Image (cartoon, rainbow, N blue to C red):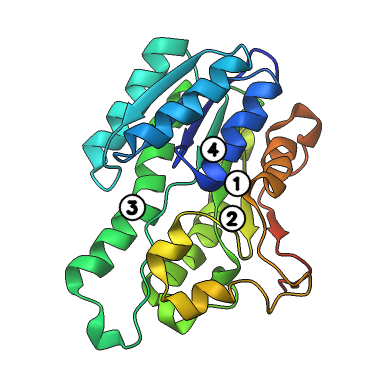
Amino acid sequence: MKGRVALITGADSGIGRAVAIAYAREGADLALVCLDEKGDMEDTAALVRQAGRECLVIMTDLSKAENCRDVIAQTADRFGRIDILVNNAAHQRSFAKIEDISDEEWRYTFATNIDAMFHLTKAAVAHMGRGAAIINTASVNADKPSPDLLAYATTKGAIQNFTAGLAQMLADRGIRANVVAPGPVWTPLIPASFPGDKVATFGQNYPIGRPAQPAELASAYVMLAEAASSYISGATIAVTGGQPII
């Protein structure tokens, strides 16, 4: 990946940070995007620069289409192109009843998780050449939706379909599109989304018996970005600790 340019959303912590560090160590320069987590993002950027790579930091609300277009413009202005787009930013909250989900919460979840992916991808492809890669983060919830994550799980199913269609649409331009579908991963979303009793047992019902650490997913994103994966497109790579996705 030496000398390639990657844009990663949700890069301040969790999976996004792990992917950023892995890409930097593989030789990529990075544009890192997050909402407003300045301290966390500064830590991620410092780790990227310690690996000897260039790093552009952008903090913005991706639920707004104009902000998505601005992210792509800033990245293209800085680096001249985009070789890898990792759509990883997500919003997640849990609710026991559908009546508890406000219209605003439903709309914001979709705007952040799937609308932003569309706007970023649409703007990015103009700056992507043959051999470029788009990697979208879905979830095991796309296939086995948790009822208390109704809004989030619905967007993750949409991401899988979006990516499957996108891979076909972009094939003649030499741009690949794939999904990584994580199982339970210990990220800041977990304690922020679930009550304490669920946090305490999070991931223990999976075959490996524990949640993943974000770094354990990074290799999937590296593999999908590499030129050696030139025939992998339209795929969903499940990183689920032994839980099958069929």
Tell me how far mark 3 sits from mark 2, CA to CA: 19 Å
Answer yes or no: do the residues labelled 2 and 1 have beta carbons within 8 Å? Answer: yes
Answer yes or no: do the residues labelled 3 and 1 have beta carbons within 8 Å? Answer: no
Q: Nearer the viewer, mark 4 or mark 2?
A: 4
**Element on which disc 3 rests:** helix
The residue drawn where x is 34% and y is 39% is: 37
For disc 1, the marked residue is: 167
Tell me how far mark 3 sits from mark 1, CA to CA: 21 Å
Residue 174, quarter of picture: top right
Tell me how far mark 1 sits from mark 4, CA to CA: 25 Å
Q: Mark 3 or mark 4: which comes first in sequence? A: 4
Residue 106, quarter of picture: bottom left
Q: Mark 3 or mark 1: which comes first in sequence? A: 3
**Element on which disc 2 rests:** helix
Q: Mark 4 or mark 2: which comes first in sequence? A: 4
The type of residue carrying mark 4 is Arg
Tell me how far mark 3 sits from mark 4, CA to CA: 18 Å
Residue 62, quarter of picture: top left
For disc 2, the marked residue is: 164
For disc 3, the marked residue is: 112
Tell me how far mark 4 sits from mark 2, CA to CA: 25 Å
Q: Nearer the viewer, mark 3 or mark 4?
A: 4
